[in-house]
Image: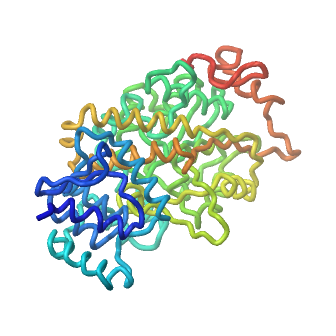
């Protein structure tokens, strides 16, 4: 009698209408699928039941996070995820749920025999505890309470866990990799410096960092540019970690971190505002308020640096669909908007847009570095969180790296200005001039001048 894998593969291909690009090994040791393809291991029948109850990427994710489905160690994670992404694109994101047509005739009888023979029919397995069910029970979407719950789900998983993944910089956003940069730490230092230069920071200026994380940008801006700063975050563990780092640096008299929503900040004006990797949490229904709030907190002539992931625009009539895995496990209530929408809403809030820079390839490289960190110290990562949590982070960061590489999503830095009463932007006339490092008196590394290709220098100190 054929093994479970040999029974499953032809049925799956019938349901998908395409050849399966991966190889399956089932709990009985049977294998089927293209030779040499990435190998997926179904450790037990629960893996199939996850798919029966949720026959799409969320069902696959639940099976993986719960440990019922494994990637064979001899297979490359990126190859497997790339094959699955191409399959989804080829089949137009079809689910594995059989249609009424699939259930009649010889094909339907084979489907039923396979379901009975492999034990796929059964009760729904319990949801992994890492799924964000608590967020969905927390009230109205993007209310203050629900946003705090959503942020806590993602960020309050242990500062030591994040330190393992992110490295000593504790920067949880896209790094900046000028040519020749090989270290994640150097790339994150270069990104922090790029943000400070775009904001035109000078000694004595007052900086607001919205979604300040563990305080890395505040620390860099104070230590290298002499600013005073306020950071706000909804993560209690981030706030505590940032305050400890600021105290260790002896900067508690110049830097403050609050456990506060950006909508609650009322002590402007600020000379500059940074929002790095935070706007994805705002929600499309709140983004206009986000823009007007930050505009109101800036002094005339002040600059906003909005660093935000963007999705590709939908085709006419095509609905927006966020990944159900990302929504359930990673960024509950998160939203991605096309870059054009973000620019338009910031302009409607009153800002003048002065510069837009894509860092898409930079984020792919950053994510691969984070995955390397996680895999290098896997056992400790599991001890610091849970096996399921470590699996979630590995899956989402690797899949996101591929999404950036393949231009399915992007990330952009938007520099916007609240112009003065006479329309003065306060910026020098050329990009090379306003990106000049005030400490060196010359354009910094990685900045393009008229005769300089992008990213030809060494990373900033």
Q: Is residue 42 above or below residue 373?
A: below
Q: Nearer the viewer, residue 221 or 70?
A: 70
Where residue 117 sits, quadrant-wise, is bottom left
Q: Nearer the viewer, residue 128 or 68?
A: 68
Q: Nearer the viewer, residue 36 or 275?
A: 36
The N terminus, quarter of image: bottom left
Task: Residue 404 in the image: state x and y as whole percent.
Answer: 52, 44
Q: Is residue 326 above or below residue 163?
A: below
The C terminus, quarter of image: top right
Where residue 441 sits, quadrant-wise, is top right
Q: Residue at position x 38%, y 48% from top?
A: 81
Q: Residue at position x 67%, y 58% from top?
A: 341
Task: Residue 356 in the image: state x and y as whole percent.
Answer: 69, 41
Q: Residue at position x 70%, y 19% from top?
A: 443
The answer to whether residue 152 of the structure is visible from this angle is no
Q: Is residue 248 above or below residue 54?
A: above
Task: Residue 259 in the image: state x and y as whole percent.
Answer: 43, 50
Task: Residue 257 in the image: state x and y as whole percent.
Answer: 46, 42
């Amino acid at each position: 009698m054929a093994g479970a894998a040999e029974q499953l593969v032809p049925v799956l291909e019938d349901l998908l209408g395409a050849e399966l690009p991966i190889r399956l090994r089932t709990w009985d040791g049977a294998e089927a699928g293209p030779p040499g393809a990435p190998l997926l291991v179904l450790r037990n029948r629960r893996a199939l039941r996850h798919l029966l109850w949720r026959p799409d990427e969320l069902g696959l994710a639940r099976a993986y996070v719960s440990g019922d489905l494994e990637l064979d160690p001899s297979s490359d994670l990126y190859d497997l995820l790339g094959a699955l992404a191409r399959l989804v694109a080829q089949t137009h994101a079809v689910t594995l749920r059989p249609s009424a047509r699939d259930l009649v005739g010889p094909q339907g009888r084979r489907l039923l025999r396979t379901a009975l023979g492999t034990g796929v029919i059964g009760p729904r397995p319990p949801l992994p505890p890492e799924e964000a069910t608590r967020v969905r029970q927390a009230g109205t979407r993007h209310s203050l309470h629900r946003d705090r719950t959503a942020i806590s789900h993602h960020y309050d998983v242990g500062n030591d866990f994040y330190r393992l993944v992110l490295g000593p910089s504790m920067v949880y956003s896209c790094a900046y990799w000028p040519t020749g940069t090989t270290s994640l730490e150097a790339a994150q230092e270069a990104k922090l410096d790029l943000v400070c230069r775009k904001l035109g920071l000078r000694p004595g200026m007052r900086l607001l960092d919205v979604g300040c994380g563990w305080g890395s940008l505040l620390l860099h801006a104070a230590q290298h540019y002499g600013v005073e700063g306020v950071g706000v975050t909804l993560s209690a563990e981030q706030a505590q970690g940032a305050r400890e780092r600021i105290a260790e640096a002896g900067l508690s008299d110049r830097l403050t971190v609050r456990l506060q929503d950006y909508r609650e900040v009322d002590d402007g004006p600020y000379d500059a505002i940074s929002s790095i990797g935070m706007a994805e949490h705002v929600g499309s229904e709140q983004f206009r308020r986000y823009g007007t709030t930050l505009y109101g907190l800036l002094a005339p002539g002040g600059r906003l640096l909005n660093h935000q992931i963007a999705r590709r625009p939908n085709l006419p009539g095509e609905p927006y669909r966020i990944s159900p895995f990302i929504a359930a496990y990673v960024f509950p209530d998160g939203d991605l908007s096309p870059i054009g929408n973000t620019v338009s809403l910031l302009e409607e809030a009153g800002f003048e847009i002065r510069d837009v820079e894509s860092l898409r390839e930079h984020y792919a490289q950053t994510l691969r570095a984070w995955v390397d960190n996680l895999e290098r110290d896997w056992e400790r990562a599991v001890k610091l969180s849970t096996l399921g949590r470590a699996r979630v982070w590995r899956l989402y960061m690797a899949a996101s790296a591929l999404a950036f590489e393949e231009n399915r999503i992007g990330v952009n830095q938007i520099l916007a200005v609240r112009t003065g009463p006479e329309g003065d932007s306060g910026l020098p006339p050329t990009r090379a001039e306003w990106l000049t490092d005030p400490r060196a008196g010359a354009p910094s590394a990685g900045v393009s001048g008229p005769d300089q290709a992008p990213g030809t220098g060494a990373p900033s100190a």
